[in-house]
Every structure is written in structure tokens, then in C-alpha cells.
Amino acid sequence: MHSSCFFLFLIPGCFYLSTLAPSIGYQDTPEFVDTSFALGISHPSGSPAYNLIAKAITFLPLGSIAFRVNLFSALLACMTLVVLYLSAIEVIKICFPESSSESKIGPALLPPALLAFSYPFWFNSLIAEVYTLHSFFTVLIIYLLLLWKNKNDSRFLYLAALSFGLSAGNHGTVAFYLPAILILFFIWEKKHKIKNLSITTLFFLVGFSVYLYLPIRSMAEPIIDWGNPETFQNFFDQVTDRRHADLHFSKLGELSTESVSQEAPSFWSGALSIISKAGYVFWRLTEDLARQFTWLMVVGFLGGSVLCAKKNRPLFIFLFLISAVNAAFFVGWRKESYFPSYIVACLWAALFFYWLLYEKLSSSINDIASSEKSAQLKRTVRFSICAISGACVFGLMISNYLQVDRSNNYFAETILKKELLSVDDESILVTEISWFNMAYYLDVMRLRDDVVLVKAADFLEADPASYLTPKRYPELELPDRKKYQFGTREAAFNYMMQFFRDNAKSRPVLIEQNWLLFEEFQLAEELLPHKNLLLKFPSDKNESLIHVQGGFNEFKDWMEEELKKPGFQRGSKWIRKIAYFLTSFSNHFHATKKYDEEREVLKILYDFLGHRDADWHLKMLDNLVLDDKKKEARRLWEKMRELFPNKFQTLLAEGLLLKSEEDYQSAIDSFNRASNIEPDAFRPYMEKCYAWIVSGNRKQTILALNVASKKMKTLKDFKRIEKVKQFLETTH
């Protein structure tokens, strides 16, 4: 058994080390490297346990800081596999008490081996992420509870409670384990329920106290200080992730009940809806298991769940609740978010494989063979089954190696490092898309100590001044918060513009291409093209009159350099980040009426990044209409009608085209049909206002404007409405 643990740690560990990312990766990985090294506040729920434990790893004298934090994920992945193997043995022991030690090794070893080389688990073992620590804590809690049962020793229960509290400080969704744990506790605990419940609660609170890190560290104003959890409300919002609550269980919420008759009784409608959603979750989970593990795991998962339900009902309920709630909560995400469900699947699969090899097989062979031949036949069949299982593991190993290999991947670093090195001296850099990367360069690599980093999204907060504080930015000019009644986007925009104006007098204010701000505010037209990804806020009116060569050509040169690097085609997540920058360029050129440049960006998105959906066609048609290229616009609309018939974007494009051709009534009809498809969309009503204005119908303009006012979502929408109102007032 000990040798199995050693090889289960060593063999996957060697593969993980050979494919380990040497630097920062995509999405959240620069954030976790930075918050581990500089002890910042990660995105909700803050991950204090991860940051504190990973901080210890950064002291190892092995490679770069990013490499060390990536190595932390690999070590945790190996530890997860070992504890999962030990947990599988305990599950078999509970369900089959007469099983020998030797018979449990093979069945308990196979599922962790499949997990080790599954794509999402392997990939997340190579980068700085919370998921391998999440997996380790999950399986550790299960293992300690199983030991509590098998050894009848309450100390394991207390350790499980402590681990549960610490695990909450890494990934908040472990809160879903609580009902399962309580059910198991009240069924398995026979004597001292109140006493042990009190002690376990105390141990949990000791572990959970790791969250005190958030307000304490936030007061030191680290660069990444997500949620600013210094007040009770901010702390609560950070821990519970209330801002993204609408995304959780999102796919279940999207499941329509169209198949349920509207005239059916509400009880049956509700029942059918629950059954439909449960079936959807089950289908998505089994589909994911088949894709990531082969169908061998699906068979083990289903067969083992039935066996567990028969052999030990409390254990089945416990594992079922962990798996089912996790699968439902993350049904729209899957992959690494499904790790708790993967762990349960592995435990049930181990149980099934044991039953198949040592219970079912033995009884079946004994029925058909003499005692002299049965032993040899059992060995042959077991060897064959093990060979097939080993082939599945080997197949995953071979097929996923090139897919996950990050050993020479620096794509997440090169472009943005160039950008930071290119900024003007003593700059204020306002960024969002690359915020994590820039924080990493400033905190960890110390590339530009003269640059002050400002998070663009702070200007979108309900109270931006609570994030832009003198303590955090002592060297900057901050507007007087008393002059602003925060709570509206307009107040936030005015505060931001004043911040830019005040600071641009003494140092360059550079805003990175930023689709988030450009979608929300009419900001793009206020900025000057500067270089590469950077835009500049003019220090005075005279500067805005100076022609400044834009940086898009430089950015294109950078992209061409990236495309030449081997393996770039596998950097799909990095390609999506580049797409955000290109979208920002497109928005900027559109706002500043540089339609030729906008078309160039849109063509790059179409030709190289594969953006060929209805939204892309709508943007291109809008560009052509505004640039008075009506023939090209009509050809594009005819193509849209073939590719995307009766879609919202096609009908909206039709209305824009007809309005440009002065067929206003037909245009209004198209906008109405578009509104019927997406009733909450703002633009069709706004475009109807414009169509009614140019057609001279003031009454209909006011009616459409009133409806549009109820649909507006951004400050840009509000400004458009105000502009029409002002026009109506002056022409009254």
C-alpha cells in the first residue's frame, strides 16, 4: 500500500514537472502569483488560505516566483491523488468489511490514475490556481470522516472540521458540503452528539478564522485588493461573492420550461421542471466524465453509486450531496469546477471495480468452472480488466500531454510586458484587461517602480472614492469626494474625468485599450491615440489638437511576432484576451469616427480569430452604414439574412440599413421585430427614436424615447437619451 502511494505521487509528479508552466499563465494565474507573493486580496471569496500557504512556497529557492507558485499546484495535485487513493480504500472497507488489504489496492489505484491524467486536473496542476488545493481539501475532509467511522476515533472528526474551516478560506463553495457533513454526523455519531458537535464547531471556527486575513491585509492597501473588504458589508460581499450571484446555477436558470404546458397545474409544472433540470445536470456530468476520463469512469461512477446505496446508505447520501450540488452549481462551467464531483466519481468507481474484480467475478467463475481452473481463470480475467484499465490511463496520458504542456509557454507575458516597458516615465496607468499581469510586473518583477497602477473597474464601483483613497495613492491628486453624490454612473463618470484632469497636469495619464469603460462611458472620444495598447488623456486642449500617430500598427506587429511562436495555436485563452483588446480598438475607432481603422480591426477579428457570429456582422454593417457605404452594407445584410435568419442582430441591421436609405417606416417595423425577440434591448428603441425624428413624427419619438429610458443600462445610453431630449426641447 505504501509503495502504491509513492508511485501515485512520483509518476504523475514527473509528468506534471515536465509540463509545468515556467511563468504566469492566463486569466487568474497572474493574480494568484501576485496575491501569494505580495499577500493581496484575490477575487471572491478572497482565498486567504491559498495565499497564505502559497506564500510559504515562494521562499523555496527554485526558479522564478511564478514557477514556485505553479509548483505548489503540482504538489497539491499529487497529494490529492494519494489521499484519494487512501479514501477509496476506506470506502471499500466500509462497504466490504471482509475485503483483504491486497484486494483493495488495484481498484483503489485506478480512479486516481485516471484523474491524474484527465485534461482539467492535469492542466490545473501546472498553473497557479486554487483548484488543486480545493481538491486536496475536499478529499482530505472525506478521508478524515471515513477514518473517524472506521477507527471510531473522534480526533479524526475534529481534524475534518478544522480542514473544513480552512477549505472555506480557499474556495467558498465548500459551504455546500455542510448539509452532507451534518447528515453523516448525526447518523454515524451514536453517543456524544452535543459534545462532539460543539467541539467540531470550535475546530471549524479556528480554521475559518483564516478569513480575518482579508480585512487586516486590506488595510495595508496591496495593489490587488479585491472588494476592499475593510468594512463589514464589503467583507460579507467578498466572502459570499454576492456580486456574481446571478451567475451561479446560471445554466439551470436558463433551462426553459417550454415543454411544460402552460395550462398544466402548477404542481406538475414545478415537478416536471425539477425533473428536467436534474436530468440536465446528470447528463452534463456523465458527458463530462466520459470526455475527460473515458466511459470506463462513467460505468464505475454509475455502478459504484448503486453499490454504495445498497451497502451503506448514509455514506451514499453524503457523497451524493457533495457531487449533486457541485454538479448543479457549476453545470455551466464544468471542467475544474467539477473536481469535487470527479472525486466522488473516483470513490464510487473504486467501489465498483472492487465489486467487479473480487465479488462478482469470483461468484460468476465459481459457478461455471471447477475449483482447479477457477483460480487461474480469475487471474486471467483480472489481468485482462486491469490491462484494459491501464490502456485507458495510458491513452489519457498520450492524448493529453501535448494539450496541457506549458513548459515553454510565455504567451501570457510577452505582449503585456512590452506594453508596461513602453509607458511614459512617471505614468499613471489605468488598466482592466491586463490588471493582473501589470500587478505581477510591478509587485513581483518590480519592472517599473515609477508607474502607478489604477484599476479601471474601480471607477465603476458604487463609491469609487472608497477605492481611490489617499492611503492607497498618496502621490496622486484625488477629487474631493464630498462634491459627488455617488450611487449613479454619471457621478462615477464625473469623478473619473476629474481624476484624469487633475492628474494629467503633472504626469501622463495613460488608459489601456479598455472595452469595459468604453461600453459603459463615452470615454473613447476623450482620449488620444498614443502607442501600442495605450491611449492618453490630454493634459490640455492644445494637446488634443496635435495629431498623434495611433499604436494599432505596433500592436499588429506584436501579434505577428506571437503568431510565429510554436504552440501559439494552443493558447486559446490568451487568444481570447487579445480579442478583448481588439474589441476595444474597434470601440475606440467607432466612437472617434475612424471607420476605415475600425473595419481593419473587425477584419482581423474575422480572419484570424474566427469572430464570425451575428454580433460581428452587425458591427460591420453599422460601420458601413455610418461610413455611407450603403451598397456594401446591403450585400452584408443579405448575407446575414442567409446565415442568421430572424435573429435579433439581423433585424436590427435591417433597420439600420433601411433608415440609412430613408425608408423610415420599414426601418421602424424592423426595429419592432427586433424588440419582440429581445424585449429588454435598448438599441432598437433608441434607433426608433432617431427614425421617428428624421421622419418628423414628434409624438412617436416621445413614446419611443419613454420606452428606451426604461431599457437603458449604461451611462452611454443615458447620454443618448438626454441628447434626444435636448433636441426635442430646442425644436418645440
Image (cartoon, helix red, strand yellow):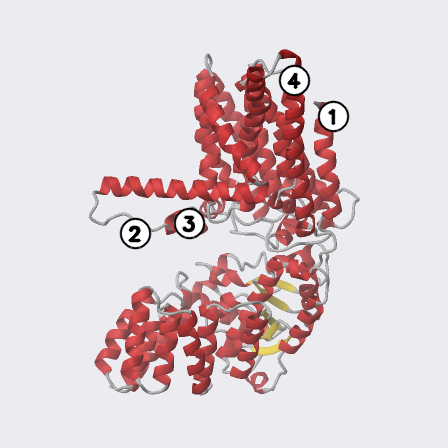
The local secondary structure at tag 3 comes to helix
Instruction: Compute the Cα span from label 1 to label 3.
Output: 43 Å
Instruction: Compute the Cα span from label 3 to label 2.
Output: 15 Å
What residue is at 65 percent from the left and 16 percent from the top? 373
Q: Amino acid at mark 4?
A: Ser
- Pointer 3 residue: 251
- Pointer 4 residue: 101
What residue is at 41 percent from the left and 78 percent from the top? 638
Marked residue nearer the N-terminal end (1 or 2): 1
Q: Quadrant of the C terminus?
A: bottom left
Q: Are marks 3 and 2 in contact (CB under 8 Å)?
A: no
Instruction: Compute the Cα span from label 4 to label 2.
Output: 53 Å
Marked residue nearer the N-terminal end (3 or 2): 3
Using a 10 Å C-alpha cutoff, classify the residue at mark 1 as few (fewer than 14 neighbours), some (14 to 19) or many (20 or more): few
Marker disc for residue 3: 1
Q: Which mark is in front, 1 or 2?
A: 2
Q: Position of residue 573 (x, y in %)?
A: 60, 58
- How many numbered dots are placed on residues in this image? 4
Marked residue nearer the N-terminal end (1 or 3): 1
